[in-house]
Image: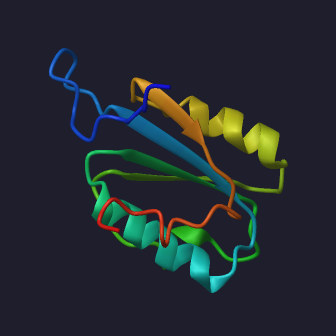
Amino acid sequence: MQDFMLPDTDSPETGRSTLSVVIPSHNPEALFFIEIGKLLSDHPDWQVIVVDDGSDRELRGFLPEAPNLTVLRNATAQGAGTSRNIGLRAVTGIIRSFWTTTISWIGMSSSN
């Protein structure tokens, strides 16, 4: 069996981010914001798209400023599937990944 590893750098052929991560979220818990911050700092070359699915309070104000972070917001809750599709429209990466707010980034970083 051959191991598969995602490239950690921009694609020299396109100048685009190699990986885009779409994360729909509705009223996440505090750990979500810590994990997004860690994801952004561990992989500044990845495009991270958070889709705020009509949360009671806008998530943008709780997320760190980062050039590789895009925050989109649904005015009302549309559900995870619709939010993923909205996030997909903003993807620029060659590889697309869809995460849920239940995936923990802590403990998965490349520095561990």
x then y, percent, for residue 102: 71, 64
> Which residue lies most toward the top here?
13
Residue 26: quarter of image: bottom right
Colour setup of the view: rainbow
- Label tally: 0
* Residue 111: quadrant of the picture: bottom left
Compared with residue 53, is residue 62 higher up or lower down, i.e. above or below?
Answer: below
Q: Is residue 2 left or right of residue 100?
A: left
Depicted 63 relative to depicted 109: above or below: below
Is 31 or 90 nearer to us in this picture?
A: 31
Q: Position of residue 108 (x, y in %)?
A: 47, 63
Q: Position of residue 37 (x, y in %)?
A: 40, 71
97 to the left or right of 77: left
Residue at the far front in the pictured view:
1
**Residue found at x 68% / y 77%:** 57
Residue, far left: 12
Horizontal side, residue 52 vs residue 13: left or right:
right
Where is 87 relative to 51, above or below?
above
Vertical placement of residue 101 versus 92, above or below: below
Residue drawn where x is 35% and y is 68% of the image: 112
Question: Which is more toward the observer, 104 or 100?
Answer: 104
Of 2 and 39, nearer the camera is: 2
Q: Residue at x 84, y 48 (%)?
A: 78
Residue positioned 51% across, 65% down in the render: 105
Looking at the picture, how far across and down is residue 12, in whole percent?
15, 22
